[in-house]
């Protein structure tokens, strides 16, 4: 298999490029993709390499082959996740009623990872780890790992099992409001668990958002690491809201 100088498979690089052109509208819905031969000439590769790239896009639901007609871009909607002062994933992406944000696991961890302990200023205290997935119209578009200071959120895991909602569980322990004070955005290849949860082909890219939510008095409450399908979600950062908070 052909590989780039970085060791990244060439078919994946081509798939990434075509995916980007589909998402940004260069290849709008219902438009026919260039033929395998045309794409092979464009990228300077063998047709088999192009065929593998297009197959990956088809597995993601971005293109579909019509017998005797060619490969066409499938109508799709890019979901927008807005990162703002009061970011709530369950309210941010998708239409009301079309989105579900469901916890799949919760456990108290005596020694959480260093970044979690540092961001939450735990000073040796345990943290509650909560794993969730976000579905839009039946498609899983994100997986999150959230950490909470147990001292601030006693019995949060119990309320979470009862309510199936982080926001409702926090209200049950007396926390009605919290704000986003820090976020960092990056991207990488999805690991095996993420690929399985989000039904992604090997080599797919996820957008990673690490963030901290605090109480209004700036006491750290929640550290979250969320991975989004890059082919389905766009991140929109509201800088004005963070400037109003104090420039985080």
Image (tube, helix red, strand yellow):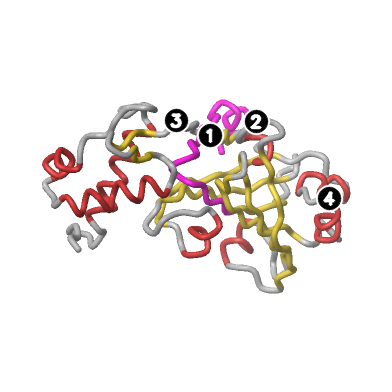
Contact check, label 2 and label 4, Cβ < 8 Å: no
Residues packed near mark 3 inside 10 Å, few (<14), some (14 to 19) or many (20 plus): few
Spot occupied by residue 154 in the image (x, y as percentages of width and height): 85, 60
Mark 1 or 3, closer to the camera: 3
Tell me the CA gap for discs 1 and 4: 26 Å
Spot occupied by residue 76 in the image (x, y as percentages of width and height): 47, 32
Spot occupied by residue 93 in the image (x, y as percentages of width and height): 60, 35
* Secondary structure type for disc 3: loop
The residue that mark 3 highlights is: 75
* Secondary structure type for disc 4: helix
Mark found first going from the N terminus, 3 or 4: 3
- Relative to 51, does residue 176 appear above or below in the rendering? above
The residue that mark 1 highlights is: 79
Q: Residue furthest bottom?
A: 110
Q: Which residues are magenta?
A: 225-248
* Secondary structure type for disc 1: strand
């Amino acid at each position: 298999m052909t590989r780039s100088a970085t060791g990244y498979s060439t078919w994946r690089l081509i798939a990434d490029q075509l995916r980007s052109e589909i998402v940004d509208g260069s290849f709008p819905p219902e438009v026919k993709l260039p033929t395998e031969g045309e794409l092979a000439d464009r990228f300077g590769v063998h047709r088999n390499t192009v065929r593998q790239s297009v197959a990956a896009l088809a597995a993601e639901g971005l293109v579909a082959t019509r017998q005797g007609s060619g490969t066409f871009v499938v109508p799709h909607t890019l979901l927008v996740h807005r990162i703002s002062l009061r970011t709530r994933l369950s309210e941010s992406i998708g239409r009301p009623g079309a989105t579900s944000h469901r916890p799949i696991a919760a456990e108290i961890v005596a020694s959480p990872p260093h970044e979690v302990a540092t961001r939450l200023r735990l000073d040796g205290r345990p943290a509650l780890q909560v794993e969730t997935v976000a579905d839009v119209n039946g498609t899983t578009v994100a997986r999150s790992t959230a950490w909470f200071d147990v001292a601030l959120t006693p019995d949060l895991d119990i309320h979470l099992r009862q309510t199936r909602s982080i926001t409702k569980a926090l209200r049950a322990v007396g926390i009605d409001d919290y704000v986003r004070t820090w976020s960092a955005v990056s991207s990488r290849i999805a690991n095996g668990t993420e690929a399985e949860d989000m039904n992604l082909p090997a080599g797919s890219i996820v957008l990673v958002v690490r963030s901290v939510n605090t109480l209004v008095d700036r006491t750290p409450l929640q550290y979250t690491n969320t991975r989004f399908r890059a082919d389905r979600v766009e991140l929109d950062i509201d800088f004005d809201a963070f400037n109003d908070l104090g420039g985080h």
